[in-house]
Image (cartoon, grey):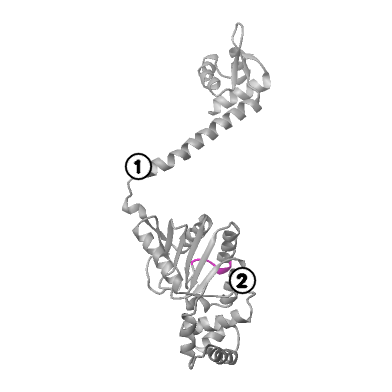
């Protein structure tokens, strides 16, 4: 509705049945101007003509008029949605639309959060520093994503465990439903529903993510999904927050298999180096391994869920 049409309808609601001349006088306009509005008001079902002469107009009660307009608008929306599929089928892909560049730290962070919030079925993440968003904010958003029923799978590179309390955060995420593994992470990557991927523009080591690529359905996106799945199969499961002692041993072996030293394992697990060494000796005895490297290799080839 235009402003003039709405004004005329509201005036009829207040005043009751009116002639064009009387309504025009109340509104400070001309009868000719109101007559030009009449076809549209009748089309919208907002006014009706009363029998007799001179012509008198009656406003349709709001509950009837507005409900009819709402129903009509809903039908229009449904038709528009139904047209999306055929339109997409007709649209030829343009290379410049398959990849977009996001520049600036704040813009990268916003786009990453948008990607997470838009994931409906599954979110795949390769995790290594530097991080695009504050880790607490990212963790909160991931919790909301999982509460929506979205499956989240994350592969963490050893460097991702260097941040303070990183392993504790991962364990809490696993306890909340994330499927997490430790493994090789050649690039930072996030993929939502197999439809949209986001990764840094350059592979150079930097202290922050200043620019990123957003990849839409294409052969490149298919390759990125395949890369994640290959790394997932090779990854080692990380235990959750309330994992039993055997899972704690798994954490030691996971980091051992990743090539970390006893000191590095101790820092990441927030335990003493002596405790790590004791557990490694016990695990070597249990696995029948002669060396720590053999223990890691045996664990790597042990079936994981």
Q: Is residue 246 left or right of residue 124?
A: right
User: Residue at image x 58%, y 70%?
Assistant: 174
- Circle 2 sits on which residue? 172
State how far apart marks 1 and 2 are (Cα). 46 Å
Residue located 56% across and 81% down the image: 250
Percent of width and height locating residue 123: 50, 61
Q: For residue 145, what is the image quadrant?
A: bottom right
Asked whether 113 or 146 is in front, the reply is 146
Of the residues under marks 1 and 2, which one precedes in the sequence? 1
On the image, the x and y values in percent for residue 92 come to: 32, 46
Give coordinates of residue 215: x percent, y percent: 39, 58
Confirm or deny contact between disc 1 and disc 2 (CB under 8 A).
no
Helix, strand or loop at mark 1: helix
Looking at this view, is 224 or 202 the one in front?
Answer: 224
Label 1 sits on residue = 90
Looking at the image, which is closer to me, 234 or 47? 234
The secondary structure making up most of the magenta span is loop
Q: Which residues are magenta?
A: 132-136
46 or 249, nearer to the observer:
249
Q: In the image, what residue occupies the spot 35% across and 44% down?
A: 91
85 within the magenta span: no
Does residue 133 show up magenta in the picture?
Answer: yes
Picture quarter with the N terminus: top right
Q: Residues within 10 Å of mark 1 (few under 14, many from 20)?
A: few
């Amino acid at each position: 509705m235009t402003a003039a049409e709405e004004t005329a309808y509201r005036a009829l609601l207040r005043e009751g049945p009116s002639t064009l001349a009387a309504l025009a006088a109340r509104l400070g306009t001309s009868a000719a101007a109101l007559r030009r509005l009449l076809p549209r008001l009748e089309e919208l079902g907002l006014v009706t003509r009363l029998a007799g002469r001179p012509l008198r107009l009656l406003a349709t009660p709001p509950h009837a008029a507005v409900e009819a307009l709402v129903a009509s608008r809903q039908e229009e929306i449904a038709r528009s949605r139904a047209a999306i599929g055929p339109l997409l089928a007709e649209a030829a892909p343009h290379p410049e639309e398959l990849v977009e560049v996001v520049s600036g730290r704040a813009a990268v962070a916003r786009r990453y959060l948008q990607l997470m919030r838009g994931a409906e079925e599954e979110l795949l993440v390769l995790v290594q520093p530097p991080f695009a968003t504050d880790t607490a904010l990212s963790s909160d958003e991931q919790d909301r994503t999982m509460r929506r029923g979205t499956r989240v799978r994350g592969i963490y590179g050893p460097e991702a465990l260097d941040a303070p309390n990183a392993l504790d955060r991962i364990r809490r995420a696993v306890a909340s439903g994330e499927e997490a593994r430790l493994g090789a992470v050649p690039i930072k990557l996030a993929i939502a529903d197999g439809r949209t991927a986001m990764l840094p523009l350059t592979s150079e080591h930097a202290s922050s993510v200043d620019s990123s690529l957003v990849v839409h359905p294409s052969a490149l996106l298919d390759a990125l999904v395949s890369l994640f799945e290959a790394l997932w199969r090779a990854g080692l499961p990380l235990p959750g927050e309330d994992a039993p002692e055997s899972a704690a041993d798994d954490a030691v072996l996971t980091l051992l298999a990743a090539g970390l030293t006893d000191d590095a394992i101790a820092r990441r697990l927030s335990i003493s180096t002596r405790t790590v060494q004791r557990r490694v000796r016990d695990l070597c005895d249990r696995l029948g391994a002669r060396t720590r490297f053999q223990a890691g290799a045996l664990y790597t080839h042990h079936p994981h869920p």
